[in-house]
Amino acid sequence: SHNNSASSQNITLQNASLYYVSVNVPIEGDASNQSVGVHIMLDGNEVLGGGARQGYISNQSGHSSASVHWSGFVYTTSTNRSLSIEVGQDAAAGTVTVLSGQKASMFAQKLQTTSIFAARGSTINATPSTDWNPSATSSVKWTDRVQTDTSLFTHSTTSNAHQITIASAGNYVLSYTDSISASTAYVSPIVQVYKNDQPVAGAIGSTHYIRNAGSHSKS
């Protein structure tokens, strides 16, 4: 439930369930090395993996606008939880506004209990396992499984945790999000989806960029 005039920042998730949430914030700034962080909050606490920080603005050579976007799942085991989206300075100071003529947008949908696989991870199949910018590509290990339809998806959190086996042919919606930090300048990892050890055409993300200047160390 939601009210446009009273506490409009809050959306009440009435049921204990898994929810799909998507947020987009188009921004423009007035200073170098600005970045806005977007935080997905549940009852005032950021959900696991609920940060987005791609909106870097160098304010050089005409680069004064960007966008911050997040899509993923929010899981609650109790009723009437308050969902909100918070923003804040994530690098250099200065004024950042929503792009002229535009608006921030968000979408939330309660998901069914079938045909779903949802999981989290913080390590990859490399050494060190916490460095998400390896010189050779490495797979994310999904060690925290939140919801699985076992009639359709097979997965282990301990053995080959990077692999999900899908039992039926068909079209599947895939949503991926992450948030990283680095102490090195110009870090820009890519994310590529693989099927049967082959890259899926078009299923690539390259929105990460860390300037490591003006306090910009996250993406």
Image (cartoon, helix red, strand yellow):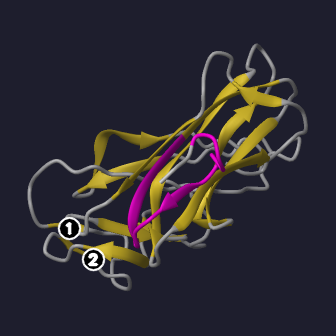
Q: Which mark is residue 155?
A: 2
Question: Is residue 182 left or right of 169 when viewed as pictured?
Answer: right
In this rendering, position of residue 109 left or right of residue 129? left
Residue carrying label 1? 114
Coordinates of residue 35 in the picture (x, y in percent): 76, 39
Stretch of the chain drawn in magenta: 4-23
Residue 75 lies, with reference to residue 38, above or below; the image says below
Horizontal and vertical percent position of residue 65: 70, 23
State whether residue 59 is above or below residue 91: above
* Residue 133 seen anywhere in this rendered image of the structure: no
Q: CA distance from mark 2 to mark 1?
A: 16 Å
Pick the front one: 49 or 2 = 2
Look at 71% across and 57% down and name the residue there. 181
Q: Which residue: 47% across, 78% down?
A: 78
* Magenta stretch encompasses residue 14: yes
- The amino acid sitting under disc 2 is His
Q: Nearer the viewer, residue 76 or 80?
A: 80
Q: Are marks 2 and 1 in contact (CB under 8 Å)?
A: no
Query: Is label 2 in a helix, a strand or a loop?
Result: loop
Q: Secondary structure at mark 1?
A: loop
Residue 76 relative to residue 60: left or right = left
Instruction: Determine the residue positioned at 52% across, 50% down.
Output: 2
Q: Quadrant of residue 41?
A: bottom right
Disc 2 or disc 1, which is closer to the eye? 1
Q: Amino acid at mark 1?
A: Thr
Residue 93 horizontal/vertical position (percent) = 90, 38
Position of 140 relative to 201 (above/below): below
Residue density around tag 2, few if under 14, some if 14–19, many if 20 or more, within 10 Å: some
Q: Residue furthest left?
A: 169
For marks 2 and 1 on the same chain, the one whose residue lies earlier in the sequence: 1
Question: Height in image: 84 above or below 186?
Answer: below
Q: Position of residue 52 (x, y in %)?
A: 62, 49
